[in-house]
Image (spheres, rainbow, N blue to C red):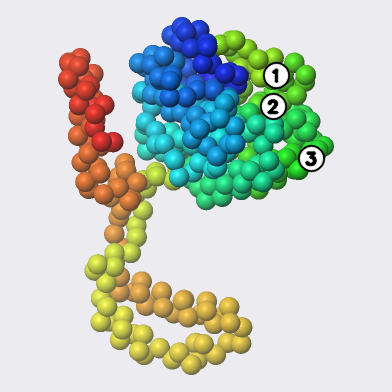
Amino acid sequence: MLIYYQNVNRIRTKTKDLFLNVLNSHYDIVCLTETNLNNSVFDGELFDTRYNVVRRDRYESSSHKSEGGGVLVALKKSLRFIRQISWDSEVEDLWISVLPDSVGTKVINICLCYLPPDLPLECINTFYTNLQNIVTRFRDTEEFLCIGDLNTPGIHWLKSSNSNIMIPSTPKGHKAELLCETLSLCNLDQFNNIPNSDGKFLDLVIYSANCIQVFEAEPLTREDRHHPPIVADIDFEQVRTNTFKSKRQKRLNFWKSNFSKICTDLSLVDWVNVLSLENVDDITDAFYRELWSIIKKYTPLTRDETNKYPVWYSPALKRCLNEKMKYFRRFKKFKNPRDYDSFTSSSL
């Protein structure tokens, strides 16, 4: 998946150049910061019909300035995503969850952000606290990409000798310390290795896995020397997880347990003798050993059914997915645009 990023430093007067350059590009996702857009500019003036556009213009945030700022994400219509409005902080950030095409691939949560250089420290602290809370809540099962202009020049970045990771060195100032603290707490790494004309790294690419590479890119609009445009390439083959992998393992079938015999055997246990140990941990272990030995004695084993869906998928959701894919298969076979319309207009 190719993700283009650029701080465009106001594009309200450069919409035609952006539109024409996007027509000649093949990026899956385009992320732009400091867009300076408002209601007078329509999404169709910026991107062609291949993209869905999500914006958070400055007036939608709590910034005290009415001009400048703003963030935008454009996603290819082939990508399924959820706009996570409840995850947005009070500053200029925009959260999107890109959903996997198949079971076994993790969700990638993207946070596009713009932190102005004059942003009060209290607001910066609020942003990083919100980021930490979200990442730590879902870090074990989902991936996170934070990309944008974090305006933290007080960090010297050193490239790791055996990976693409950029290592922070000698952070100066509270903003730099907050960023380093977030990377450490959330187990995230920074991957942008392309400095600006001053040798600084204002635009960062922070990711939760090591399956990403960052390259310099041709600008989609006039380049700001302080913000060189970049492309982040995420290898989806390495973003797979075995969390949903079905395994035909045997498990206890409690529907067929003989509860009357279980109760009878439990009443015959000499609990005073079993629980006569001194250490409370040993007593707890002894209790559960006795309990499980009786339950397993009168509970048969059954083999799990193979299932390509996660266990929490309801029958109704499975039917919706199957119906959606039915139209997709028909479109692939007969090329009938009505089948594609039915596929794309599905509620999933």
The answer to which image quadrant residue 7 occupies is: top right
Q: Which residue is mark 3?
A: 173
User: Of the residues shown, which amino acid type is indicated by label 3?
Assistant: Gly
User: Of the residues shown, which amino acid type is indicated by label 2?
Assistant: Leu
Residue 174 location in percent, x, y? 76, 43
Name the residue located 57 percent from the left edge and 18 percent from the top edge.
10
State the CA–CA distance, disc 1 to disc 2.
8 Å
Q: Nearer the viewer, residue 264 or 57?
A: 57
Q: Secondary structure at mark 2?
A: loop
Few, some or many residues within 10 Å of mark 3 (<14, 14–19, 20+): few
Residue 309 is left or right of residue 191, and the answer is left
Q: Nearer the viewer, residue 306 or 130?
A: 130
What is the quadrant of the C terminus in the image? Answer: top left
Residue 204 is left or right of residue 322, and the answer is right
CB under 8 Å between callouts 2 and 3?
no
The answer to which image quadrant residue 9 occupies is: top right
State the CA–CA distance, disc 3 to disc 1.
20 Å
Q: Which residue is mark 2?
A: 202
Q: Secondary structure at mark 3?
A: loop
User: Of the residues shown, which amino acid type is indicated by label 1?
Assistant: His
User: Please, is residue 237 above or below residue 181 in the view?
Assistant: above
Name the residue located 54 percent from the left edge and 82 percent from the top edge.
283
CB under 8 Å between callouts 3 and 1?
no
Residue 88 location in percent, x, y? 50, 41
Name the residue located 65 percent from the left edge and 31 percent from the top edge.
116
> Could you tell which of marks 2 and 3 lies nearer the N-terminus?
3
Q: Secondary structure at mark 1?
A: loop
CB under 8 Å between callouts 1 and 2?
yes
Name the residue located 30 percent from the left edge and 55 percent from the top edge.
303
Few, some or many residues within 10 Å of mark 1 (<14, 14–19, 20+): some
> Could you tell which of marks 1 and 2 lies nearer the N-terminus?
2
Tell me, for residue 226, which label it has, or none: 1
